[in-house]
Each structure stands twice: as C-alpha cells, then as structure tokens.
Amino acid sequence: MEGQERPILDETVLDPSLPPWKKDALSCCQVDFIEQPITYQEFYNRYLRPNRPCLFGSHVTSKWRSRREWVSKDGKPNWNNLKEMFGTLTVPVADCKKVEYQAQPKEDMTLAEFLDYWQDLCRSEHDPGKPCLYLKDWHFCRSVPDYGAYETPVYFQSDWLNEFWDQRYHGEDDYRFVYMGPKGSWTPLHADVFRSYSWSANICGRKQWLFFPPGQEEQLCDTTGNLVYDVRSEELLNSKRYPHYQKDTRPIEVMQGPGEVVFVPSGWHHQVHNLEDTISINHNWINCCNVHMMWSFLQSELGRVQQAISDCTDMEDWHGHCQVMLKASSGINYEEFVDFLACIADRRLMDLATTEDGVEVKHPRHHHHRLDLRTVSSLLSVIMADQDCQRLGSVQSKIDSLKRALEKLDP
C-alpha cells in the first residue's frame, strides 16, 4: 500500500480473552467525525477495539481512481464513463419497493441497462411512480480485478475474512462490493454477515445511516423474534406484535457525504438510505478484535438450526446434518470456521518465520501478527469446550493440528 502507514500495533495493547465491546459499545451515544488523518494505533484504541462507529473525512478517499473517473464535475455519477468502462458487465439489482422473505428481491441486468434506468429516473426528477432499483453487492474487484478503483484504507487492512476467501476460493468469491443507487433507494434494518465489521466509502452522493448498538435490536423484534423490516414503520407501535419496543428507542443517526467513509462495528444493526444519487464501495471484514463475535454468531445460528429439526434427533449423524444446514443458512459451518482460523495462523507463522540469508526479517506488522496468533490460540480454547464441536471428529482433528502449529510461536 504505497504511501500509507502499515497497520502497526504495540503488542501489549490487547488481551484477546477480554472482548470489551459488550460494555463499551452500549455507552456510545455519538459518532465522531475524523476530519484529519489519525494513526492506525489511534483508530484501534478509540474505535476498532471498543467497537464504536466513526466517520472519516474525504481525505481518506481523495486519491482514489473511482472518485476521479466515476464522478462528473457536478458531483453526479459519470454515466458515460461507467457505461464505456463497465457497461457490458452483469450486476445484481434489488427492487426497493418489493419485499420477499424480508428482503428486497434481486435480478441481474447489465450495468448499461441499470444506468439507462437511472438516467431516465433522474430525467423524471425521481418520479415516485417509477420503480426504485438499487445495484447492490456487486463483486466489482472480482469482475474487474486489474482496474484499481480504490486502495483499502490502512485502518481496515487487517482483514482476515477477505484474506481467507481469496486463499480459499482463488478470487472467485469475496466480501468486497460496489453499490449504486438513486435518491430514495435504501437497505432495510440488518446486522452484517457473520457479525463482521464493515466500512463504506461514498464515491459520490450522500447517505443517512441509522445505527442501533448491540442489544438494542431486541426492542425491534416481533413476538416470533424477527426484526422489523423498516424502523420507520408505524407497525412498531403495535405493542401486541412488538411488545419490547419503546417509543424512546432512537437510532444514532450519521449523515455521510461524498468521499467520506463510515466504520460499522460488529453487531450494530443499521438501516441505510441514499439521500442523493449515490455510489459507494463497501467491505465486510473480520480480525482479531471481532472474531470472537463471529464464533458466538455461529453458535447462535447452530442453535436455531438444531431447534428447527429438533424432532429428527434420532436420525443418523444428526449433528452432521445440522452442520450442513448451518453452512447453507449462514455461509460457513464449524469445520470451515476452524479452516478459517488455521489459514490465518499458518500465514502469520510463515510471515514471522521469513528469513533472508538465514536472518529473520522484522516486518513492522509483526506485532499485529503475534496479536492475531494469540487471539486464535485463545479462541481455540473456547471452541474446544463447545459440546457440539466435541461431537465432530473431523473438526477436532483440525483443532489438534492447529494447536500443534501454534506451539511453534515463541512467547
């Protein structure tokens, strides 16, 4: 990452057995705007480790190619450039005015077709009678790997999730996305995949973010445990359906302008609205600070699966079938989660052991590597105590192999 600080940490700053987000996140009542550059250590101490949201100024994205080539002089999307460069590519597009299974249904179209729709909507001055389509979750880097639309900001470079997915799927899948949507398009209330962090950079346009700290989402669930689809909906006032909702339950609001970057902490539910015609770049990511939350999420999701098929416990390999269903519903199961940890540990150990002419090379990121390895070791102890994990022989053998690999790490 030329010209950027590497993610360097004092190796004493973290005890991986003490996740502070359970207490600190709830005390956050405002979101800091970071107008001037700060160090990675400052970001880590103030926001990443305490699991608090923040908003970075446009200095973070000022040199990005996408901000030069995707935006016109008037601050609007540069339709012509986007069509010329990417118009033939297929993109996923959601319909914001329809709901299917508590989500906005999607269909594929070419980017040129979507941009034609968008331009027509702009010419109609965003006629409310027209469809409201939103290009979402486009794996842009996978589609155009050599374009170089942006550089991941230094604050978000410790990214185990995409590191693992790149290694596992050889560029065929990732958690890096581009979003493009007209004024009025939006994303319903949700928490991010695997309870990951996310960051979202506006290339152009403005967004409104409505944040709810971890735990507050319980007040937004109906009697069956399902989240309300739209936090602006009057259905929340139905006390029979939403008995835990309180009228003083208010989100933390963030207004994000062009070039600005939002850091979304783990487990914070949020709803997002495009206030103008907007293009954004988004990553989901996990590292040593929130991987415990990912594990807790998987345990919770497995509990849901087990409850759903609790009448079939006498079937052969019931626990194995639960893992298959967990993978299908959540995108990962216990065995792949251990593979995920093993991939990160192996790469960190390899980097730490790198030598030149027999002399160890001291990388500036080594402190973070040791932090990562201590976190993996701490989490392994938690996983080994899990009763469901103990019933999975293949997972246990992988854990044993990973433990032996970690024993190579010097104290």
Image (cartoon, helix red, strand yellow):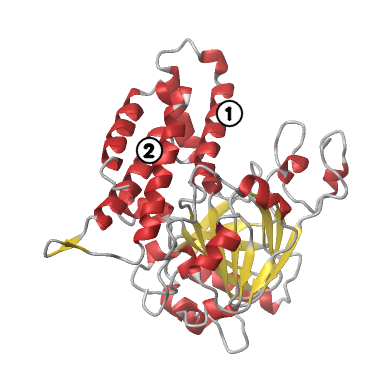
Identify the amino acid type marked 2. Val
Image-based side of 93 in relation to 217, left or right: left
Q: Amino acid at mark 1?
A: Arg
Q: Is residue 167 visible?
A: yes
Residue ID at (34%, 27%): 396
Q: Residue at x 21, y 59 (%)?
A: 354
- Pick whichever, 147 or 340, lies toward us: 340
Foreground tag (1 vs 2): 2
Q: Mark 1: few, some, or many residues within 10 Å (few <14, many ≥20)?
A: some
Residue topped by disc 1: 304
Q: Nearer the viewer, residue 298 or 91?
A: 298
> In the rendered image, which residue does mark 2 sit on?
338
Between 331 and 343, the residue placed more toward the observer is 343
Residue at (30, 42) in percent of width and height: 406
Label 1, label 2: how far apart the Cα atoms are: 20 Å
Q: Where is the N terminus found, in terms of image quarters?
A: bottom left
Write down the quadrant of residue 197 in the picture. Answer: bottom right
* Residue 188 visible here: no
Q: Secondary structure at mark 2?
A: helix
Q: Position of residue 30 (x, y in %)?
A: 73, 63
Q: Is residue 261 above or below residue 232?
A: below
Q: Position of residue 176 (x, y in %)?
A: 46, 60
Mark 2 Cα within 10 Å, few/some/many (few <14, many 20+)? many
User: Relative to residue 347, is residue 109 depicted above or below?
Assistant: below
Q: Is residue 225 left or right of residue 239?
A: left
Is disc 1 placed on a helix, strand or loop?
helix
